[in-house]
């Protein structure tokens, strides 16, 4: 699937760029992009009904790996439009992709990939993906 615009993502959020998001190089600091993808990921999990109660009572997602390719430097004022999707489900992990677009410039600003592991917060160990997660993800990604 091509990354041309937000229409390729069934789950989307918008986040306003603040002056304080910029660094000495006068563009949004690279760490903010990771914050934005985290917000999009949490929104996706809520939409899928995946518990965000990390209280030890159930299995929840945990980030095992993530990267970010920076394509276009965003600045204040702007709005980050983030689309996120699951690209692959394996036995023990979910692969996600988040695309960050500049609303002001109508262009792709960054692309991030994440690997999420189902984690049993009560036993403090990796788990298998609950079947309910797969069902809900499949509904979202239709």
Image: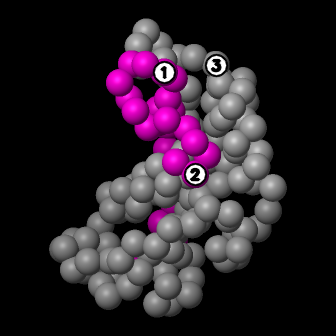
Asked which secondary structure carries label 1, the reply is loop
Which residue: 25% across, 71% down?
21
- Please give the range of residues in magenta: 46-74
Spatial CA distance of label 2 from label 1 is 18 Å
Q: Residues within 10 Å of mark 3 (few under 14, many from 20)?
A: some
SS at mark 3? loop
Where residue 45 sits, quadrant-wise, is top right
Residue beneath label 2, please?
Answer: 47
Identity of the residue drawn at 67% across and 48% down: 86
Query: Element under label 2?
Result: helix
114 vs 139, left or right, is left
Badge nearest the viewer, 1 or 3: 1
Mark pair 1, 3: CA separation: 12 Å
Vertical position of residue 120 compared to residue 23: above or below = above
Is there any visible trace of residue 35 in the rendered image? yes
> Which of the two discs, 2 and 3, labels the residue nearer the N terminus?
2
Colouring convention used in this rendered image of the protein: one colour
Of badges 2 and 3, nearer the viewer stands 2
Where residue 58 is drawn, which disc sits there? 1
Precedes in sequence: disc 1 or disc 3: 1
In the rendered image, residue 96, in percent from the top left (x then y), is placed at 62, 47
Quadrant the C terminus occupies: bottom right
User: Gap between marks 2 and 3, in whole Å?
Assistant: 20 Å
Q: Residues within 10 Å of mark 2 (few under 14, many from 20)?
A: few
Label 3 sits on residue: 128
């Amino acid at each position: 699937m091509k990354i041309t615009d937000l229409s390729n993502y069934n789950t989307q959020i918008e986040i306003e760029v603040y002056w304080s998001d910029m660094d000495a190089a006068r563009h949004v600091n690279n760490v903010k992009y990771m914050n934005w993808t985290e917000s999009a990921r949490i929104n996706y999990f809520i939409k899928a009904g995946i518990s965000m109660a990390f209280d030890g009572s159930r299995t929840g997602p945990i980030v095992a790996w993530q990267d970010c390719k920076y394509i276009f430097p965003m600045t204040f004022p702007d709005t980050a439009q983030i689309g996120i999707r699951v690209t692959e489900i394996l036995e023990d992990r979910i692969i996600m992709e988040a695309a960050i677009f500049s609303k002001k410039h109508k262009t792709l600003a960054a692309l991030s990939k994440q690997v999420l592991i189902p984690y049993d917060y009560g036993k403090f160990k990796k788990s298998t993906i609950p079947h309910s997660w797969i069902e809900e993800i499949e509904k979202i990604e239709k």
